[in-house]
Amino acid sequence: KSMDDYARDTTSRENIHDNDDLEHDPWNQQVRNLIAGTAGGWSQTIVGHPFDTIKVRMQTAVGGANASLLECLQSTMKNGVHDFYLGI
């Protein structure tokens, strides 16, 4: 092969992925999966937990307290944003 042929082969899209040893390394894939799973779990907790907190407070309200979404949000916010994450 000439140098031009070699340069074309190594820069084509097919060969870049075929020659990438890191992509086929099982440890690399496990680390990538671990990082992705951790990021997904944290994201779900940060975004989803406040909604779950409000839902549970509305379901367990006694005597009409926190009967509406707005009332529940207001009573939860009285003590600060950290109340949305109680129980984590």
Image (cartoon, rainbow, N blue to C red):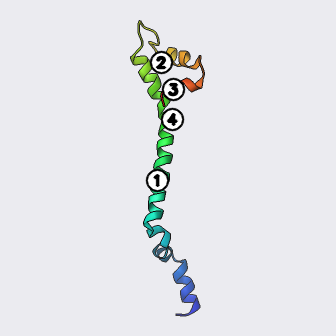
Is label 1 in a helix, a strand or a loop? helix
Which of the two discs, 4 and 1, labels the residue nearer the N terminus? 1
For the residues carrying marks 4 and 3, which lies nearer the camera in this image?
3
Which of the two discs, 3 and 1, labels the residue nearer the N terminus? 1
> In terms of depth relative to the viewer, which is nearer, 5 or 22?
22
Residue 76 — which label?
none
Determine whether label 2 and label 3 are within 8 Å by CB. no
Q: Within 10 Å of the Cα at label 4, are there few (<14), some (14-19), or many (20+) other Cα atoms?
A: few
- The residue pinned by badge 4 equals 47
Q: What residue type is labelled 2?
A: Leu
Coordinates of residue 57 in the picture (x, y in percent): 44, 19
Which of the two discs, 4 and 3, labels the residue nearer the N terminus? 4
Q: Is residue 83 above or below residue 11?
A: above
Q: Is residue 66 above or below residue 42?
A: above
Q: Is residue 34 above or below residue 65?
A: below
Q: Which amino acid does label 1 sit on?
A: Leu
> In terms of depth relative to the viewer, which is nearer, 15 or 63?
63
Q: What residue type is labelled 3?
A: Leu
Residue 86 — which label?
3
Q: Within 10 Å of the Cα at label 2, are there few (<14), some (14-19), or many (20+) other Cα atoms?
A: few
- The residue pinned by badge 1 equals 34
- The residue pinned by badge 2 equals 69
Instruction: Tell me the CA gap for discs 4 and 3.
Output: 14 Å
Is label 2 in a helix, a strand or a loop? helix
For the residues carrying marks 2 and 4, which lies nearer the camera in this image?
4
Which of the two discs, 2 and 4, labels the residue nearer the N terminus? 4
